[in-house]
Amino acid sequence: MASLQAHLRQAQHNESLVQQLLASLEYKDWIITVTFYAAIHYVEAAFFQNPKIVHTETSITPNYPGGYHGYRSDMILQHYSEIYPSYHKLYQQSRIARYLYFRAERKFLEKPIQENFSESDVKSFSQKDLATIRQSLNF
Amino acid sequence: MGIVFYQSDVTMPYAMPRMPDLENAVLKFLVHKIKTEQAYAEKETVQYYSEIAGVYSYLRETMGAISLEPLKFSTLFRQLEWLDILVGREEKVEADIEQRVERKVIDIFERIEQVFSIYVDEYLQRKRFLILTTNEKYEDELMDRLLITERDVRLQFKHIPLSFEYIPKLVETLGQVLNPNARLIWSRTLDGIPTSSFAASTT
């Protein structure tokens, strides 16, 4: 299990990369993905500080409904519901950006991912959603 | 599922309970509880499992003793009757909750005009709702509305493992999913008229 500081440093490191990528907006797909990877480390850092929550990767049962992501989703709902929409937005959209398809429907994107998201969408992921997560978790 | 047992008296032989039926009933109940509630294993839930496991253990021991000492059967009968009621109720409650969740999802998501149809299936032990929308590319405001709505539904049914996926109209036919296990529970027609699988739906 990574330490609180390790999660926080990784979150800040990823967020710093997001800022660099936002300067050109050339890699929208990676902006979305790295924004989510920053969010997930802020969330795990918050879990680390919360005695009611066990660490995701090392402590949940193997058959937990929905696996790791299901567990994070449930813990966020129960303990940090104010960040639920922002976190799930980043989780879902980064998955689409990485795999170019909608899992439930097995429907693939026909256009490049760059065309699915506007510049303002991508900026909003960082400036609105990631910021909401970080500030709500007091980091 | 009902398990019928007959109590012994002096004039009639009693029908021996069938161990496999009993075990299946108890195990099915336990496995289901563990699958659905392990995720939320608070102190009370652990206590609850312990009590159920205790009853199960008691039943096994008593069943083993029955063949040697039929007089214990009246005690066992009371336990089995209780268990039968419990299992039966559990199944009914489950069905009711499933319907309540689906109705709630329909009632709340149909208010979002870009939602065209709603399917449901099961994925990774979660009841999963597939929400098909009419937008042809990502729309941030719509996604905010959908996710806030999702959170509200999930907060109302905290102890049921749910998940949601949002599928925009990117290609092919609007409102159709390819997953053969998905069940359509609500759809808006091209004229915008909603239809639901629930006869008594408020739609």
Image (cartoon, rainbow, N blue to C red):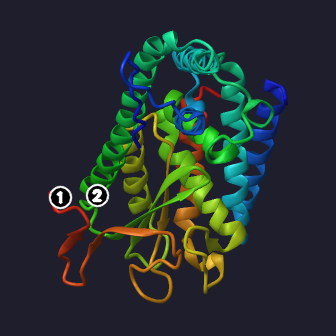
Q: Quadrant of the N terminus of chain B?
A: top left
Q: Quadrant of residue A50?
A: top right
Q: Where is residue B91 in the image (x, y as percent from the top left)?
A: 39, 41
Residue at x-position 41% and y-position 20%:
B8
Q: From this viewpoint, is residue B202 visible?
A: yes
The furthest residue to the front? B11
Whether residues under marks 1 and 2 lie with C-beta atoms below 8 angstroms apart, the answer is yes
Q: Where is residue A61 in the image (x, y as percent from the top left)?
A: 72, 35
Separation (CA) of disc 1 from disc 2 = 9 Å
Helix, strand or loop under label 2: helix
In the image, A57: left or right of B194? right
Q: Quadrant of residue A2?
A: top right
User: Mark 1 or 2 closer to N-term?
Assistant: 2
Q: Which mark is residue B106?
A: 2
Q: Residue B201 carries which label?
A: 1
Q: In which quarter of the image is the C terminus of chain B?
A: bottom left
**At label 1, which amino acid type do we have?**
Ser
Q: In this view, does B54 lie above or below B32?
A: above
Residue at x-position 66% and y-position 62%:
A95
